[in-house]
Amino acid sequence: MDSPEDPELPPPPPLPPPLPVEEEASQLPPLLPKPFPGFWQAAGLFVLWILMTVVVIVPAMILDMIRHNEHKEFTMHPVTLGLATLLASTTVLWVARRRTGRGLAELFAWVPVDPSVFTAAAGLVAGILPLGILTFLWLERLFPGIVPKLDYGFSKSRWFAFVVIVFIAPFCEETVFRGIFLRGFEGRYGASKAIALSAALFGLAHGSLVRLPHTFALGCALGWLYSKTRSLWVSVAAHMLNNLIAGLFLLAGGGGGGGLTPAPVKKPIPFHPVEPVLALTALAILLISIRSLRQQQTFRTIME
C-alpha cells in the first residue's frame, strides 16, 4: 500500500535587505566617553598647574632681583603665593569643565554626612600631622640642613599668610586633586589606585621630596574621605584643620624660623624623650580613626 505524500512546507520568508553601514551604526548603543581625566591627561593638567604658578612667581622674582631683595619680599609674599594658587586651580578647573561640564556647583554639591564622620576625619589629621612633624625632626637629625626652611610668607605678612594656607589653599587644592583628578581616576582605575595616584600628584605639587611622605599620606587620607563620602566639604574641612594646626605653629613661632619644619642648624636637634610617646599616641589615634570610618554606615558608594 502506497504511503500518503507529505504536504509541502511553505517557502521561508525573504530576508530583509541589509542596512546601509551608516544606518546600522546609528542603531548601535552609543559608546560612553571615558571619565576625565586619565593619568596622562592629569599629568598634562598637573604641568599646567605648575606653569600657571610660574606665571605668577617669575614676575615676583624679577622684582626681587631688580630691587636686590635678598629675603625674596615679593617672591615669598603670601599675596604672590595666594594668587599663584588661585590662578593654577582656576585654570585647571576651566579646562576640566570644558571636558566634563562639571563646575564648582556640582563638585561642591552638599551630600548629607553623619557628623561623626567629621570627628573621625579630625582624628586622621591628628594622627598624620604629628607623625609628619616627627619625620622632619628625625630627617634633620640624620641629615642636618636637608629639611627646607618654610614659612609660607609668615615672615612677610603673618595674618594674610594664615588666610592663604588655612582657607585658600585647601579649597583650591581639594577642587583639583580630589574633585577633578580623583573623580576621573575612579572611573578608570578603581578607588584604591585613584586615591594613590591623586595623592602622589598632591604630594609632588608641594615641591619637596623631603615632605613627600607626609603630603602623600595626607593626600591618601583626604582622598579616602572623599571617595567614601562623595563630599568635597569633608575633605576640605580635614585639609583646613591640618593647615590650621600648621598655621598656629607658624604663628607661635613668629614666622620666618618657627613652625613645622625646623630651620637648618649646624648641630643636630637633640632627642627628646617625649618623641616616641607622641609617635605612639599619634599612631593610636590614626588607627582608631580609620576603624571608626570603616564602621560608618552612612558612606555612599562610588557612583561615577
Image (cartoon, rainbow, N blue to C red):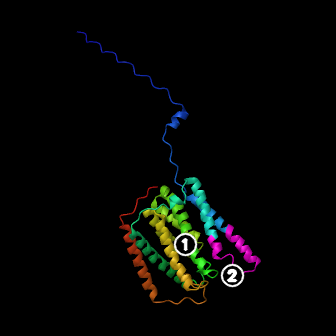
**Residue at point 43%, 79% (across, down):** 282
Q: Is residue 73 magenta?
A: yes
Q: Is residue 229 visible?
A: yes
User: Is residue 72 shown left or right of residue 259?
Assistant: right
Residue 49's x, y, as percent? Answer: 62, 64
Q: Earlier in the sequence, mark 1 or mark 2?
A: 2
| Quadrant assignment, res 298 | bottom left
The verdict on residue 153 being magenta is no
Q: Residues within 10 Å of mark 1 (few under 14, many from 20)?
A: some
Q: Judge from the rendering whether residue 29 lies leftward or rightward of residue 90; answer left or right.
A: left
Tell me, for residue 71, which label it has, or none: 2
Residue 259 visible in rendering: no
Q: Identify the amino acid type marked 1.
A: Phe
Q: Where residue 164 sits: x, y (%)?
A: 58, 74
Q: Which mark is residue 127?
A: none
Q: Looking at this view, is 207 or 293 the one in front?
A: 293
- In the rendered view, does 5 fall on the left or right side of 109? left
Secondary element at tag 2: loop
Q: Residue at x 50, y 82 (%)?
A: 134
Residue at 73%, 77% in the rendered image: 64
Q: Check disc 2: other Cα within 10 Å, few if <14, some if 14-19, many if 20+.
A: few
Mark nearer the viewer, 1 or 2:
1
Mark identifier at residue 167: 1
**Identity, as a three-letter code, of the amino acid under mark 2:** His
Q: Quadrant of the N terminus?
A: top left
Q: What's drawn in magenta, residue-wise?
A: 55-82
Q: Residue furthest left?
A: 1
Q: Quick one: 153 or 40, which is closer to the camera?
A: 153
